[in-house]
Amino acid sequence: MSASYRRDQSIRKKGNCMPKKSLKVPKFKNEDEERKFWDKVSLDEYFDSADFVPAFFPNLKPSSQSISLRLPSFLLVRLKEQANELDVPYQSLIKRYIKQGIAKK
């Protein structure tokens, strides 16, 4: 039995979650209007916390953006050597080093 099947079944079993009161969501002209609406709404007024189930997004990829970065040649050679030793792509190694550097702060 797959994990997604079991998760779907657990959601269906919980299916008797009835809202406390009806939530009417209007059509929004833009994101600012929608943001203002959701800033004012408290879902506690409409649902019990037991009604919610954890969300699972297995195929969601973090968005990334391409950048251009100039590095001294010797540094790029050393990065590629280290990446080869670790058997990872050098660009992934650069991202790992940047992430580690940011996490230290």
Image: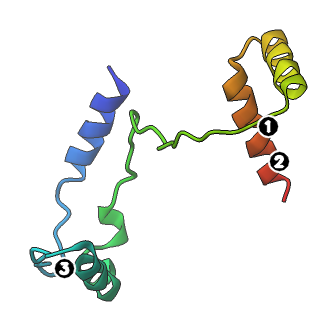
Give the side of residue 10 with respect to residue 70, left or right.
left
User: Of the numbered discs in the image, which one, if any, rests on residue 20?
Assistant: 3
Whether tag 1 and tag 2 are in contact, CB under 8 A, the answer is: yes
Residue matched to label 1: 97
State the residue at coordinates (67%, 27%): 92
Residue kind at label 2, given as amino acid type:
Gly
Q: Amino acid at mark 3?
A: Lys
The answer to which quarter of the image holds residue 89 is top right
User: SS of the residue at dot 3?
Assistant: loop
Q: Secondary structure at mark 1?
A: helix
Which secondary structure lies at badge 2? helix
- Residue situated in front as seen by the camera: 105 or 43: 105
- In the rendered view, tell whether residue 37 sits above or below residue 101: below
Between 75 and 54, the residue placed more toward the observer is 75
Q: Horizontal placement of 86 versus 11: left or right? A: right
**Residue closest to the eye, 5 or 89:** 89
Mark 1, Cα crowd under 10 Å, few <14 / some 14-19 / many 20+, is few
Residue under the image location 26 percent in, 47 percent down: 11
Quadrant including the C terminus: bottom right
How far across and how far down the image is residue 27, in percent? 9, 74
Quick one: which residue is furthest to the bottom in this view?
Answer: 40
Amino acid on which the number 1 mark rests in the picture: Tyr
Q: Nearer the viewer, mark 2 or mark 3?
A: 2
Spatial CA distance of label 1 from label 2 is 6 Å
**Which dot, 3 or 1, sits closer to the camera?**
1
Q: CA distance from mark 2 to mark 3?
A: 47 Å
The residue under the point 51% across, 43% down is 65
Is 61 left or right of 87, judged from the image as shown?
left
Q: Position of residue 76 (x, y in %)?
A: 81, 24
Specify how the rendered protein is coloured: rainbow
Q: Give the vertical position of 27 relative to 86 (above or below).
A: below
Q: Which residue is mark 2?
A: 101
